[in-house]
């Protein structure tokens, strides 16, 4: 395909167009800004000096979004107090024009959209104002007055004479994103979503400065203007503050002379557990530790501190590792505005369908800084923090005067961090229970319950089969009398009877006519052939009467005993009843059955099976109790 081209009216060079719809472009040779007038190009201005490149994207970069290929054809560069960002103009293979924004390596794709309702004028926008658009609540999360810094390549409109531009950024609870752009008299709306670098599958990226000798030389040529110690800046173009580790000066990294902004008094030197400059691999991406800060809160009058490590990857941007008492979290900022909800009696937040419960609220003071930061650090700065948990995740809102920044952490053990950064020695042991630390038994309990329930159903099935197949043959039945006042010998033996079939249990039952009396039976089941016997005794007692509450009774006239696994053969019973000497005589029947169903063993088996899951559930619950005891929202407080 031949690209349309025209000659630069300023220098005569051939200017190619990647997109037939371009209204404006720039000449690569003389940096003139050119606007299409019918068939000709008109020079309307010149691109000034642009700051050092920080984005890995360039004009000509290609990628994919929602299975559609796109190419980067133009760029608008903005600057504001907290750094700069690029709006890359992208053209999809079906000719649709969109924008890929890169703000400190946080990426979003958006498209100019017809506003679902008239947009408020610039004077009426405010943070937290919400709009219901296309079924989602868009909330204004930040308002930025940016400075137009320059353009390059092909744009869908004329854009060259801007100065300060006002933007309102909007976010939803599910990472959708919007911008109201007040650069034109009628505000423009752009709607889209946050995207991950890897998902865009970008090709033809700009070679990074750290890979070029010029870039390395520039990075290593820096020195502290206060004490002369050498400095390095890794996140060139992103870093706003760099801290001299020798004299603790905080320097303006955007100033070529590294102006000293402040100097902080370190009460003690703090050595980061992971030294600055260490590289590691987390979630299959390489990161370098470039910054370190300690933040302190007051816990009942005593300072309590945690450490934050700033990690940098020149494509994926910034991540954080936090460490408190040997507990670690891998943290990433969240390009969404979680919905605030109520979870039972506790406040909560909902993000991407997951519910988080507020754990605590604190005021954190930055107390120590080292290395470089993509924001302006200031020792003594105080920020409100709210931590919401959904173990093993922690969702934190950091509240500043300008905005609320949400970040999401995932619990890591010291051993995982040591492994990721190949650190020598052993990590400091974790002390206490951390807010989002996984309970060591929580996962086990549910799987133990599953196994237990499966085994219980097997036992129930076995019991049913046992009852169904129990034959309950009566092998002996006979009535006897016993007169305690008689001088006759009490003990006697019964006739022999046969227990047939396979070895099975044998039930010996006593049915008496006792009334307000007791009897004790010494019994022995004796194998006629071997003489081997099973001895046992049973007491039967029955008392009944009537008092002011009515009729009452205690005990029973009948009793039975089960002898387990009796071998087949001929047997007889030796019987010796005992009663009080002056008692009335009694009649009783002895009945012997074989193979009777017995539930006792099944109950014992079921009880034994229940012990491990109950114990594990109890341990998990007591862990949760200890976790929430530390929360602002513990039941105890
Ligand atoms: Zn030119
Ligand atoms: Zn210094």
Image (spheres, rainbow, N blue to C red):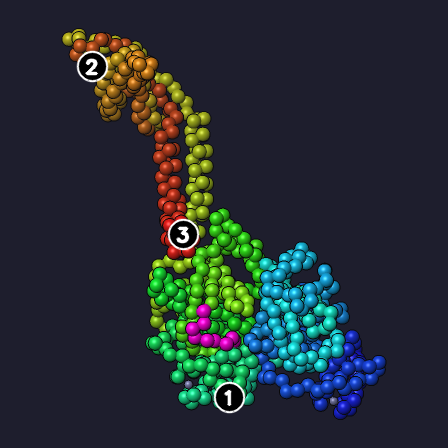
Q: Residues within 10 Å of mark 3 (few under 14, many from 20)?
A: some
Mark 2 = which residue? 579
Q: Give the image location of residue 581, x and y in percent.
A: 17, 12
Vertical side of 13 occupied by 120: above or below: above
Q: CA distance from mark 1 to mark 2?
A: 112 Å
Name which residue lies at 37% across and 58% down.
Answer: 433
* Quarter of the rendered image showing ligand 2: bottom left
Dominant secondary structure (helix, strand or loop) of the stretch shown in magenta: loop
Q: Secondary structure at mark 1?
A: loop
Q: Which residues are magenta?
A: 374-382
Name which residue lies at 55% across and 67% down.
Answer: 403
Asked if the beta carbon under badge 3 is closer than 8 A to the nearest atom of ligand 2, the reply is no
Q: Earlier in the sequence, mark 2 or mark 3?
A: 2
Front position in the image: 60 or 42: 42
Mark 1 = which residue? 257
Q: Secondary structure at mark 2?
A: loop
Name which residue lies at 59% across and 77% down.
Answer: 80
Name which residue lies at 42% across and 81% down.
Answer: 263
Q: Give the image location of residue 595, x and y in percent.
A: 37, 24
The quarter of the image holding the N terminus is bottom right
Q: Residues within 10 Å of mark 1 (few under 14, many from 20)?
A: few
Q: Give the image location of residue 185, x and y in percent.
A: 73, 72
């Amino acid at each position: 395909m031949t690209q349309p081209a025209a000659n630069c009216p300023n220098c005569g060079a051939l200017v190619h167009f990647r997109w037939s719809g371009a209204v404006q472009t720039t000449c690569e040779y003389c940096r003139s800004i050119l606007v299409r007038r019918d068939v000709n190009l008109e020079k309307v201005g010149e691109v000034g000096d642009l700051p050092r490149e920080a984005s890995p994207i360039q004009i000509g970069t290609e990628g994919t979004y929602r299975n559609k290929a796109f190419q980067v054809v133009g760029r608008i560069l903005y600057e504001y107090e907290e750094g700069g960002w690029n709006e890359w103009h992208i053209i999809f293979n079906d000719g649709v024009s969109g924008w890929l924004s890169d703000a400190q390596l946080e990426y979003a794709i958006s498209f100019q959209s017809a506003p679902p309702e008239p947009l408020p004028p610039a004077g009426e926008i405010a943070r937290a104002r919400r709009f219901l658009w296309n079924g989602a609540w868009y909330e204004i999360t930040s308002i930025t007055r940016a400075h137009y810094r320059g353009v390059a390549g092909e744009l869908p409109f004329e854009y060259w004479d801007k100065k300060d531009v006002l933007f309102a950024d909007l976010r939803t609870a599910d990472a959708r994103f919007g911008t109201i752009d007040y650069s034109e008299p009628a505000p423009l709306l752009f709607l889209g979503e946050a995207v991950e670098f890897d998902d865009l599958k970008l090709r033809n990226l700009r070679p990074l400065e750290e890979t070029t000798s010029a870039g390395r030389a520039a990075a290593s040529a820096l020195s502290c203007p206060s004490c002369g110690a050498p400095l390095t800046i890794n996140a060139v173009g992103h870093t706003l503050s760099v801290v001299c580790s020798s004299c603790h000066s905080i320097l303006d990294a955007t100033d070529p002379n590294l102006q000293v902004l402040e100097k902080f008094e370190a009460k003690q030197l703090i050595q980061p557990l992971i030294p600055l400059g260490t590289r590691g691999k987390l979630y299959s991406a390489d990161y370098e530790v470039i910054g370190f800060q300690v933040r302190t809160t007051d816990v009942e009058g005593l300072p309590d501190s945690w450490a934050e490590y700033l990690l940098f990857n020149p494509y994926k941007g910034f991540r954080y590792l936090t460490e408190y008492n040997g507990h670690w979290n891998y943290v990433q900022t969240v390009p969404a505005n979680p919905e605030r909800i109520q979870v039972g009696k506790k406040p909560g937040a909902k993000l991407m369908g997951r519910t988080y419960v507020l754990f605590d609220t604190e005021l954190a003071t930055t107390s120590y800084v080292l290395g470089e930061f993509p924001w302006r650090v200031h020792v003594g700065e105080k920020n409100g923090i709210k931590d919401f948990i959904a173990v093993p995740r922690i969702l934190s809102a950091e509240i500043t005067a300008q905005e609320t920044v949400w970040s999401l952490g995932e619990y890591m053990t010291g051993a995982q961090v040591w492994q990721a950064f190949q650190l020598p020695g052993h990590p400091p042991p974790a002390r206490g229970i951390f807010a989002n630390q996984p309970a060591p038994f929580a996962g086990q309990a549910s799987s133990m319950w599953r196994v237990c329930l499966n085994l219980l159903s097997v036992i129930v099935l076995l019991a049913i089969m046992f009852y169904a197949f129990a034959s309950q043959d009566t092998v002996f039945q006979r009535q006897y009398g016993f007169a305690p006042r008689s001088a006759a010998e009490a003990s006697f033996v019964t006739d022999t009877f046969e227990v047939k079939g396979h070895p099975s249990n044998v039930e010996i039952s006593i049915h008496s006519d006792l009334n307000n009396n007791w009897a004790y039976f010494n019994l022995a089941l004796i194998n006629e052939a071997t003489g081997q016997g099973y001895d046992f005794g049973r007491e039967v007692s029955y008392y009944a009467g009537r008092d002011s509450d009515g009729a009452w009774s205690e005990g029973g006239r009948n009793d039975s005993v089960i002898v387990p696994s009796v071998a087949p053969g001929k047997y007889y019973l030796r019987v010796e009843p005992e009663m009080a000497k002056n008692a009335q005589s009694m009649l009783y029947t002895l009945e012997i059955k074989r193979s009777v169903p017995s539930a006792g063993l099944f109950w014992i088996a079921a009880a034994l099976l229940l012990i491990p899951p109950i114990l594990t559930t109890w341990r998990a619950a007591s862990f949760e109790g200890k976790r929430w005891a530390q929360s602002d929202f513990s039941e105890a407080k």
